[in-house]
Image (tube, rainbow, N blue to C red):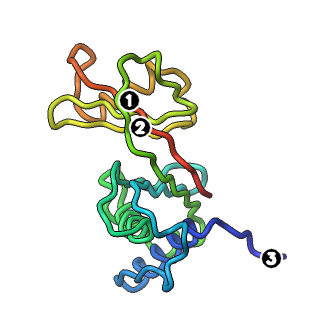
Amino acid sequence: MTPEKHHPLVELARQTIEAYVRTGKQIAPPEPLPPEMQQRAGAFVSLHAHGDLRGCIGTIEPTQASLASEVINNAIMAATEDPRFPPVRPGELAGLEISVDVLTAPEPVSSPAQLDPKVYGVIVQSGFRRGLLLPDLDGVDTVECQVDIARRKAGISPHERAQLYRFEVRRYH
């Protein structure tokens, strides 16, 4: 039986997490950098164990010199710094399911009618508070639900004025 092949960004996230959890050292981006990893983009790394969320950290806009560096940084953060979970332990590594979402640039929308939780992620912003929810998540089937969750993540009340943004993702498993 051959091991399942994953997208190169997912393989990079897995190698990063395994190296960091086992050694505490951050790996370098691949050399030469493959074309799909050269761009700059926001990215989220999500970890699941036994079907349950185990960690998810990302960037809305690029903060690193390349997508490879963005994924490396966010993979380490998802495995060790998500405040909802304890750091991943070496014994968990084999059972982790990893996905990488690469985001398009956020665009403002004038109405919730321009949103679709299966197609677009949403950002809700009021002042410096900003909440984000990725698209196509289990149990998030309506725009109202998606916006409500993003508002709660940012601490923005339902009655407070807020700007909505949408973005698309390319999700890799």
When the figure is inspected, residue 93 is found, relative to residue 117, above or below; the finding is below
Q: Secondary structure at mark 2?
A: strand
Q: To which residue does mark 3 refer?
A: 2
Q: Are marks 1 and 2 in contact (CB under 8 Å)?
A: yes
Residue at position x 52%, y 21% in the image? 142
Residue at position x 52%, y 57% in the image? 100
Give the farthest residue toward the right. 1
When the figure is inspected, residue 153 is found, relative to residue 115, above or below; the finding is below
- Choose between 144 and 84: the one closer to the eye: 144
Residue 172: image location, x then y, percent = 59, 56
Callout 2 crowding tier (Cα within 10 Å): few <14, some 14–19, many ≥20: many
Upstream in sequence: badge 3 or badge 1: 3
Residue 164: image location, x then y, percent = 33, 26
Q: Could you tell me how far apart the alpha carbons at marks 3 and 1 are, in whole angstroms?
A: 40 Å
Mark 1 belongs to which amino acid? Ile
Residue 128: image location, x then y, percent = 15, 37
Residue 27 sits in which quadrant? Answer: bottom left
Is residue 49 rendered to the left or right of residue 82? right
Q: Secondary structure at mark 3?
A: loop
Return the mark for residue 149: 1
Disc nearest the viewer among 1 and 2: 2
Residue at position x 58%, y 60% in the image? 97
Q: To which residue does mark 2 refer?
A: 133
